[in-house]
Image (cartoon, grey):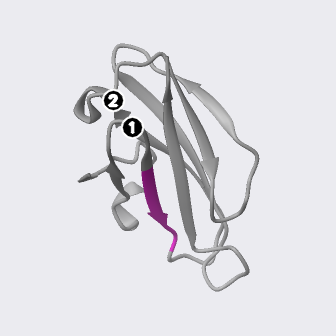
């Protein structure tokens, strides 16, 4: 498996810990933190070519909150990954653990 940082494309990105991804050729796990007392709705910029994934969509499941899974499109090797995080120090808040799987 490999590990790398994942850029955040939101205005408050500099105030947050940098998310990271760990992956192999079949799946990935993204860890995103929220140390604030406010809920966050973030967009992560994922370059699938760096993962060696040649896919048109990515299936995403939030393992931390057992949230509903979604599929996102990959365009020119880039995907925007949505991440919703509850406030820190609340049940199921402060963290997001996303499972990503490439879809052909």
What number is the disc on residue 2? Answer: none
- Residue 63 appears left or right of 104: right
Snapshot quadrant of residue 40: bottom right
Quarter of the figure with residue 55? top left
**Residue plotted at (46% across, 46% down):** 10
Residue at 63%, 59% (x, y): give it: 63
Disc 2/disc 1 C-alpha distance (Å) = 9 Å
Rendered image: mark on residue 48: 2
In this rendering, is residue 52 above or below 18?
A: above
Q: Nearer the viewer, residue 100 or 75?
A: 100
| Element assignment for label 1 | strand
On screen, residue 104 versus residue 18, left or right, reads: right
Q: Element type at marker 2? A: helix
Q: Is residue 1 above or below residue 17?
A: above
From the viewer's side, name the closer residue of 11 and 80. 80
| Numbered-mark total | 2
Q: Is residue 81 above or below residue 92?
A: above
Q: Which mark is residue 45?
A: 1
């Amino acid at each position: 498996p490999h590990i790398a940082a994942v850029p955040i494309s939101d205005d408050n990105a500099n105030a947050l810990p940098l998310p990271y991804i760990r992956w192999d050729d079949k799946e990935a796990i993204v860890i995103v933190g929220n140390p604030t007392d406010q809920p966050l709705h973030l967009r992560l910029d994922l370059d699938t070519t760096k993962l060696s994934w040649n896919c048109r969509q990515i299936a995403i499941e939030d393992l931390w909150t057992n949230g509903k899974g979604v599929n996102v499109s990959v365009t020119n090797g880039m995907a925007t990954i949505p991440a919703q995080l509850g406030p820190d120090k609340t049940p199921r808040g402060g963290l997001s653990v996303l499972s990503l799987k490439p879809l052909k």
